[in-house]
């Protein structure tokens, strides 16, 4: 995989004022009649930048020169701030469930009427992400990987499994009831033992009935050998609304390997050189 530099970020003051926006790839086939068939090749856009569209002073020129050398032209990826779109409000923040229970990818929803595109956010800005459950800030049990945009949530409640009754429906008895878990909710199981414990371990199952601390699950274990051990836990439930808020960067790279600087003037009495590089193309990279 190509090298990606988490730090430093592309200089913010040079990124400010860039020509920037999302880009798609669409295949257009035109028939003899003039009618078109259009195929959207990318479900996610890629952001394109043009920076350097102005004369830079000595300090900015030195910063850009050093940065270009550090990332080896097109060689290494880096973070860049899109000043037109770098904040996600809680109303836009989406948590996209991953295959592992409790793990989510940050996303930002862009809505226009009934149409919504969820943009995956893989480079949140360190220390800015807040996660909410049903509008309430989660002050603990949240881990954010700021290099990937993956969020890991701890279970909201858990209890030891004290009994397992196999059958066409499976009854799990816990040491204590989980107050936030209701019929139609999901119970996560881990640490069960027995020859067939793998049928239940590491998975969530829909709760079809509750009696005290006994939870009937919609899973057939007739004739299986599963022994009470481990824990039952409550993670995000189907009725929960999860969201997040924070700032994010764009993972990108230069789209050129050659720097072409030109002195255009001196900066008045200071004597500093004013330098241009024309349009400097920077493109978002898939990670």
Image (cartoon, grey):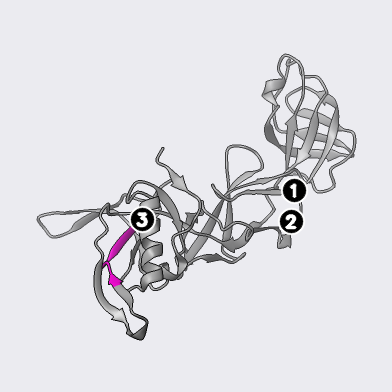
User: Dot 3: what SS?
Assistant: helix
The answer to whether residue 245 is above or below residue 212 is: below
Task: Residue under label 1, please give it.
Answer: 141
Q: Residues within 10 Å of mark 1 (few under 14, many from 20)?
A: few
Q: Please tell me which residue lies in front, 197 or 143.
A: 143
Q: Give the left or right position of residue 95, taking residue 224 as reference.
A: left
Checking the image for residue 68, the label placed there is: 3
Residue at 32% of width from left, 68% of height from top? 52
Frontmost of labels 1 and 3 is: 3
Q: Give the left or right position of residue 94, taking residue 184 as reference.
A: left
Residues tagged 1 and 2 counted as in contact (Cβ below 8 A): yes
Residue 213 image-quadrant placement: top right
User: Dot 2: what SS?
Assistant: loop
For the residues labelled 1 and 3, the Cα–Cα distance comes to 39 Å
Residue 49 percent coordinates (x, y): 35, 63
Checking the image for residue 138, the label placed there is: 2
Residue at 41% of width from left, 49% of height from top? 77
């Amino acid at each position: 995989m190509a090298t990606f530099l988490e730090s430093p970020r592309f200089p913010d003051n040079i990124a400010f004022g860039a020509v920037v926006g999302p880009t798609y790839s669409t295949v257009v086939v035109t028939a003899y009649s003039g009618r078109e068939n259009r195929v959207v090749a990318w479900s996610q856009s890629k952001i394109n930048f043009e920076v350097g569209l102005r004369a830079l002073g000595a300090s900015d020129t030195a910063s850009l020169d050093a940065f270009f050398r550090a990332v080896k032209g097109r060689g290494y990826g880096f973070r860049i701030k899109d000043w037109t779109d770098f904040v996600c409000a809680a109303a836009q923040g989406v948590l996209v469930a991953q295959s592992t229970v409790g793990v989510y990818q940050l996303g930002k929803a862009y809505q226009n009427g009934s149409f919504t595109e969820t943009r995956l956010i893989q480079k949140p800005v360190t220390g800015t992400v807040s996660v909410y459950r049903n509008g309430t800030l989660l002050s603990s049990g949240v881990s954010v990987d700021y290099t990937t945009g993956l969020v890991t949530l701890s279970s909201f409640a858990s209890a030891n499994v004290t009994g397992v009754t196999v059958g066409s429906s499976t009854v799990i008895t816990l040491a204590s009831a989980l107050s936030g878990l209701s019929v139609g909710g999901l119970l996560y199981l881990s640490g069960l033992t027995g020859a067939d414990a793998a049928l239940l371990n590491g998975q969530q199952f829909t709760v079809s009935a509750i009696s005290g601390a006994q939870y009937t699950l919609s899973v057939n274990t007739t004739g299986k050998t599963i022994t009470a051990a481990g824990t039952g836990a409550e993670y995000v439930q189907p009725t929960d609304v999860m969201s997040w808020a924070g700032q994010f960067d764009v993972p990108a790279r230069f789209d050129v390997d050659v720097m072409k600087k030109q002195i255009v003037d001196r900066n008045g009495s200071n004597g500093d050189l004013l330098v241009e590089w024309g349009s400097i193309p920077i493109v978002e990279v898939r990670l």
